[in-house]
Amino acid sequence: MAITQQRYYTPEEYLALEETAEYKSEYIEGKIIPIAGGTVNHNQIALNFSTELNYAFKKQNYRVYMGDVRLWIPQKRIYTYPDVMIVAGEPEFLNNRTDIILNPQVIVEVLSKSTQGYDREDKFQAYRTISSLQEYLLINQHQVYVEQVSKTGKKQWNLHEYNQEDEQISLVSLPFDISLQDLYNKVKFEVMEGEGEIDNLD
């Protein structure tokens, strides 16, 4: 049986390939891993969150970036595309490239079934090496459920869970609140076998 050898790329090779690629990929310690396409729910949730953030921070010194801006994590040698990033003050760019951020204060990921384990464990472990990071939100796209992890001290993080439509998420490190009703606005959950139809949250 033939064994396929894994090719490893330098960060420079990865960035050059991304310039002309037809789809986005992550870079993890030399490996290039294609990012699966998003769902309608994934897109709607990220858009809802970003829209509320952008409006709230219209006259404040925070910047909001959506999925097309890369994050470089030097300690883990990872390039990735978080769904939403918030930067407090001026963004720090890698080598003056305005498509690569170094200093997010808040990172938001909308979970998919295929990546939720990675987002909760290995990716969060990598994110924790970013000195500017204060909060990490994981948003479920298949049900009303959000995990908010906020930094409380060196190597200490606090978990807060939300699963009721009338609850409100309050960021700890930034002056921002969003209700789950607004976060899941126009999101339609899949109908599970044996269950009735679930209304969209308008």
Image: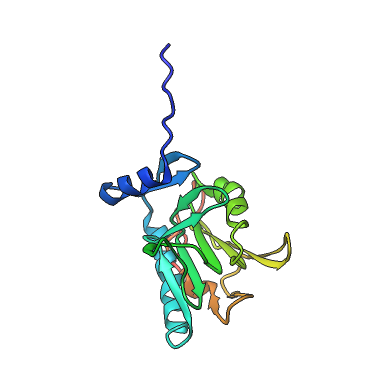
Q: Nearer the viewer, residue 111 or 5?
A: 5
Residue 91 appears in the picture as rendered: yes
Q: Is residue 196 left or right of residue 13?
A: right
| Residue 196 in view here | no
Q: Is residue 194 above or below residue 95?
A: above
The part of the image, by quadrant, that contains residue 135 is bottom right
Query: Split into 4 quadrants, where in the image is the C terminus?
Result: bottom left
Q: Is residue 98 left or right of residue 102?
A: left
**x then y, percent, for residue 171:** 60, 75
- Residue plotted at (49% across, 71% down): 86
Q: Residue at x 56, y 69 (%)?
A: 105
Q: Residue furthest bottom?
A: 59
User: Residue 49 location in percent, x, y?
Assistant: 46, 71
Q: Residue at x 61, y 63 (%)?
A: 131
Return the residue nearer the eye: 65 or 77.
Answer: 77
Residue 37, percent from left and from top: 36, 49
Front residue (pair 24, 116): 24
Quarter of the N terminus within the rendering? top left
Examine the rendered structure and indicate whether residue 11 appears above or below residue 48: above
